[in-house]
Image (cartoon, rainbow, N blue to C red):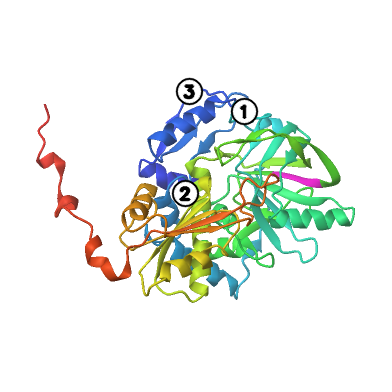
């Protein structure tokens, strides 16, 4: 993480905040202000109540994500899909055991920056922490994200999404009357962070993907109090266990959809050890921000892209996903009449969480710009004949009131037999213009 941030600092992508900031709201407010103006990373060197600096917005840029996997800006889906496929057939081990860092600092949860992000949050939350656990039956390690509320130096309250592998691990351990040992990783290397975003079958390991991205096995060391190995470059490691048959109040918390998830009964995480690197940086992630959604968008889009390709559909160029409003947009090169509708019906099966609305557009549309997508829909044919409504189909795993039921598919492509009528106007030479050659400074 230090090496990666130095590279970004050398290219003027890191803003330094020397003024002391309050972890209650102020740090999040500065973060949000920066994100409204661009995608620069922010490093807070003085955070009230902790000696550890905080860094945020590392992964809030699609360009940086593409650079991390050596993909062109419009080719993340294809490159990511190839990486995931490559990780399936690794012939070498994806990890290797090394000694724990000699200068690890031992401390308590309260020594870390305890950040409260939103006005009605129940308290400080750890939002960037990656949960590392082993399948109780197979021993396969898993990486995943879950919010965790700070209660005391001994306890966190954790919300496990029911569709996540970790929830299945916990349920199986609980059925045996056992606690599930888990390590929370804060401030990991970029390949670990990206791998944790992946959605893969339960019998695969995200560490294989991390190893494939880095091109080397991931160095791991043995935890102090639990039977887990953690990546050796992790800045902060919180060791503990999720207690069986124990639920306590957690929330409310401002989630990625832009609303507060109300207070509920959620799992109890018992802390057994907290340690960090001597020069540790604490990674903060503002939920629902570009740093939260950009990686989720990228890997979810790649999952849909691979689903469509695996289904044998021709002409699939790229996919974009907007998790904050559960939309998927697919760019195709039309091959035949009805091609877009076939793509739509297939795309709905890619996942159940982020494609309540699906658009299919032609190859000239910027699928990351919803203004262009809507423009294509409204100007390339009848709005009443190109909409497919699927009634009474679940649309999100956490939906007790069925607010997210139903799907809508929209064909925003131009008519196959009238393409000449929909050639977009252009002004030649725009990309070659340097305005400084034309505008005088007064």
Q: Residue at x 50, y 69 (%)?
A: 308
x and y percent of residue 165 in the render?
Answer: 70, 58
Residue 149 forms part of the magenta stretch: no
**Label 1: few (<14), some (14–19) or many (≥20) C-alpha neighbours in 10 Å:** some
**Where residue 19 is drawn, which disc sits there?**
3
Indicate whether 195 appears above or below 38: below
Q: Secondary structure at mark 3?
A: loop
Tag shown at residue 442: none
Asked whether residue 83 is in view, the answer is: no
Q: Quadrant of residue 352?
A: bottom right
Q: Is residue 238 left or right of residue 70?
A: right
Picture coordinates of residue 143, whole percent (x, y): 65, 55
**Distance (Cα) linking label 3 and label 2:** 24 Å
CB of mark 3 within 8 Å of CB of mark 2? no
Mark 1 lies on a secondary structure that is loop
Pick the quarter of the image with the C terminus. top left
Q: CA distance from mark 1 to mark 2?
A: 23 Å
Image-based side of 79 in relation to 258, left or right: left
- Tell me which label, 1 or 2, sits earlier in the chain: 2
Residue 322 visible = yes
Q: Which mark is residue 50?
A: 1
On the image, which quarter does residue 212 sit in?
Answer: bottom right
Which segment did they paint magenta?
238-242
Camera-side residue of 62 and 255: 255
Q: Is residue 167 left or right of residue 307?
A: right
Residue 154, how many percent across, how many down?
A: 79, 35
Q: Residues within 10 Å of mark 2 (few under 14, many from 20)?
A: few
Q: Earlier in the sequence, mark 1 or mark 3?
A: 3
**Residue holding disc 2:** 4
Residue 239 is one of the magenta-drawn residues: yes
Which is nearer the eye, 354 or 142? 354
- Distance, label 1 to label 3, CA atoms, is 14 Å
């Amino acid at each position: 993480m230090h090496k990666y941030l130095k590279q970004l600092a050398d290219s003027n992508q890191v803003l330094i905040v020397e003024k002391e900031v309050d972890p209650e709201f102020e740090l999040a407010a500065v973060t949000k202000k920066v994100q409204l103006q661009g995608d620069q990373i922010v490093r807070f060197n003085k955070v009230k109540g902790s000696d550890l600096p905080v860094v945020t917005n590392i992964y809030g840029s699609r360009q940086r994500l593409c650079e991390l996997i050596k993909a062109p800006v419009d080719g993340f889906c294809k490159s990511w899909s190839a990486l995931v496929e490559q990780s399936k057939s690794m012939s070498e081990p994806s990890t290797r055991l090394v000694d724990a860092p000699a200068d690890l600092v031992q401390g308590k949860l309260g020594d870390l920056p305890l950040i409260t992000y939103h006005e009605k949050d129940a308290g400080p939350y750890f939002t960037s922490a990656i949960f590392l656990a082993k399948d109780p039956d197979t021993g396969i390690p898993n990486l995943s994200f879950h919010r965790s509320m700070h209660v005391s130096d001994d306890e966190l309250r954790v919300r496990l999404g029911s569709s996540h592998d970790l929830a299945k691990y916990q349920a199986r351990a609980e059925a045996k009357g056992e606690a599930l040992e888990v390590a929370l990783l804060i401030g990991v290397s970029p390949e670990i962070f990206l791998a944790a975003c992946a959605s893969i079958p339960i019998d695969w390991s995200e560490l294989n993907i991390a190893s494939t991205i880095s091109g080397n096995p991931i160095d791991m060391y043995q935890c102090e109090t639990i039977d887990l190995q953690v990546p050796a470059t992790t800045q902060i490691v919180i060791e503990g266990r999720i207690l069986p048959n124990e639920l306590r109040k957690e929330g409310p918390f401002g989630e990625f959809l832009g609303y507060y998830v109300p207070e509920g009964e959620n799992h109890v995480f018992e802390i057994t050890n907290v340690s960090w690197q001597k020069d540790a940086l604490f990674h903060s992630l503002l939920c629902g921000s570009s740093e939260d959604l950009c990686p989720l968008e990228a890997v979810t889009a790649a999952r849909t892209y691979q689903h469509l390709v695996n289904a044998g559909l021709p002409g699939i160029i790229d996919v974009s996903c907007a998790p904050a409003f559960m939309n998927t947009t697919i760019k195709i090169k039309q091959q035949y009449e009805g091609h877009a509708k076939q793509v739509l019906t297939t795309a709905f099966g890619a996942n159940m969480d982020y494609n309540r609305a699906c658009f299919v557009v032609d190859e000239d549309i910027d699928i990351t710009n919803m203004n262009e997508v809507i423009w294509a829909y409204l100007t390339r044919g009848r709005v009443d004949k190109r909409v497919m409504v699927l009634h009474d189909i679940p649309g999100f795993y956490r939906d007790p009131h069925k607010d997210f039921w139903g799907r809508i598919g929209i064909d925003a492509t131009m008519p196959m037999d009238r393409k000449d009528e929909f050639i977009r106007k252009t002004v030649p030479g725009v990309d070659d213009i340097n305005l400084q050659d034309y505008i005088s400074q007064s």
